[in-house]
Amino acid sequence: MKDGLIQVACVTPPLRVADCTYNAEQIVSAFQKAAADGAKLVVFPELCLTGYTCGDLFLQEALLNGAKISLSDILEQTKDISAILVVGLPYALEGALYNCAAVCYAGKLLGLVPKKNLPNYSEFYEMRHFAKGPDANGTLSVTWHQNAEVYVVPFGALQVFSCAELPDFSFGVEICEDVWVGDTPSVAMAKSGATIIVNLSCSDEIIGKENYRRTILQAKSGSLLCAYLYADAGVGESTQDMVFAGHNLILENGSILAESKLFTQGILTAVVDVQRLAGERRRSNTFLSEPMNTVQKTTFSMALTETAMNRYIDSTPFIPHGSQMLSQRCEKILMLQATGLATRLKHIGCKSAVVGLSGGLDSTLALIVMVHAFQLCHLDPAGIVAVTMPCFGTTDRTYQNACRLAEAYGATLREIPIQDSVRQHFADIGHKESVHDVTYENSQARERTQVLMDLANQTGGIVIGTGDLSELALGWATYNGDHMSMYAVNASIPKTLVRYLVSYEASQTPQELSNILQDVLDTPVSPELLPPEQDGTIAQKTEDIVGPYELHDFFLYYVLRFGFAPHKIYRMAKHAFEGAYDDAVILKWLRKFYWRFFSQQFKRSCLPDGPKVGSVTLSPRGDWRMPSDACVALWQKDLENLD
């Protein structure tokens, strides 16, 4: 439960129709096993204490009393288990019979939730036996008798149950048909704070229903930004007219975390992240939490224990998986980048664009985007001015690749060596060329930017920025050097994704060009601002200085997308990169990430325009608004506690 991670379970137990004693035994046995495995919320199917297919037996006093007695037995046998159990039964109250869910915890009944929407078609005739459940409004309740103890529990279709120690662990209950209607009870529950919706169901299986059920639940969990636990009745129900398949699903914000095979029974488990869901809701300006007067709220106390990380954590969250999905994503991203640039070129009537082409990954991607944008604008690619500016750190490999790329794409290549200009600048400011400090490096970066800006003036064009999202996050850019441009096409592309985009372009081009792009991909990432090694190879490797980009992109995603605390991101990273990096390395670079992210915000506060392609971006005009002088102390303190 710590860090908002809750292990949950949906159970389809063995069942005998109308045998409450047997059914209760199976429910207790499955609940004990699920709880022993770490589940804190365990959901059983609709009316599973009696069976859903009892028909007119629901009007028999013996069956109704048997269900109440069996529920009391369940409460007694689970009183020492710190986990929530939600189980279905029929319950008679004030002359009416209701299809209910009993919410149980540590031997106590927390509430009874009646089904609100009753089907009355085809094979389902619930209105023959059951009454529509009323909304809870704080006045409806049930007096529960248990072992000479009497207490009052809420009764109503709209209830939310919340953990005092972890308020984000808050859930509401629907029963089967409730999720199939347009105005589902879960809407009010979610707006009242429920991050989890559980559904006790007995849905018969017919051709096509499996896919429809899955689609409905994905849409519901996505629109409500919630986790959804769907516990379905199985083969123990009567097959007189219907067959039930036990199709259990656990979903989170539109994604399926776990799904049972049809015609099976047993326990389906997954770990949901309620902090992630709460973070999504805070980010969304369309999800408005509202206090609902009709929703009854019940609080329970549960100790926060460590939840095993039985959850897939993607080590490359910016990269889609599967070759087809990756190709589709790359194609769309390139189109978004190119369309943004094309729109800008058309708006200002520009037929020329200038880019500093280093032979590295980022400038290669920028050139690719420019080529696509010129195609969209029906412009001659010769209007692309690709400028190579050799200086002290330029290697022959990157220089040759820059020249070959410009030629292959039909761009106009300009070679402007800047060594003499930089040396003159050193003389002007009194800097020794032998001192390879930040002034030595940044003087080259700023000279290159000046050249590009002036060439853009000469050609009537604009300068296209090459810096990527990962560099912006780390502040790995020279202020008013490569930090500045007139349109930054890579501004929302993280470094790990840059590589895939260039690789995708390589797969779509003729072999000769593909070979050049592949060599760019194989070249170490470097700003090439320090002299090369004696053998002519790159000496200044970025990831040796700032750390692995795959780690930083992972950190960036969870810092910006969900606002997770540093200790949680560290825990997730250990799981995602197990076997790739040891714990000390991950912690080292996470600390470095936070320090750089906070200290370098001033560079992001004045970024040029650039197209947004994903949900994580750092534009100061709406996507990420942070004061340049914000203090990192709280985040550092959180990491200190990990020592």
Image (tube, grey):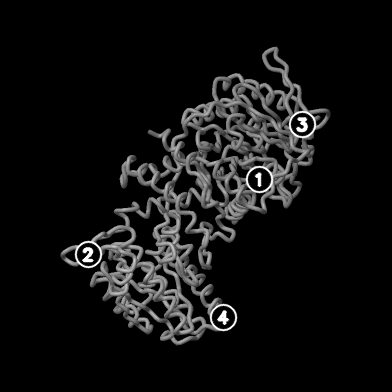
Q: In this rendering, which labeled residue sits more in front, label 2 or label 1?
A: 2
Q: Are marks 2 and 3 in contact (CB under 8 Å)?
A: no
Expressed as whole percent of the image width and height from the top left, the position of residue 503 reads 36, 68
Disc 4/disc 3 C-alpha distance (Å): 77 Å
Q: Which residue is mark 4?
A: 348
Disc 1/disc 4 C-alpha distance (Å): 70 Å
Q: Which residue is mark 2?
A: 532
Amino acid bearing label 1: Asp
Q: Which residue is mark 3?
A: 59
In the picture shown, does residue 73 fall above or below 126? above
Q: Are marks 2 and 4 in contact (CB under 8 Å)?
A: no
Expressed as whole percent of the image width and height from the top left, the position of residue 223 reads 64, 52
Q: Under tag 4, what secondary structure?
A: loop
Q: Are marks 1 and 4 in contact (CB under 8 Å)?
A: no
Q: In this rendering, which labeled residue sits more in front, label 1 or label 4?
A: 4
In the picture shown, does residue 93 fall above or below 225? above
Q: Residue at x 79, y 37 (%)?
A: 134
Q: Earlier in the sequence, mark 2 or mark 4?
A: 4
Please give left or right for residue 446 compared with residue 31 in the image.
left
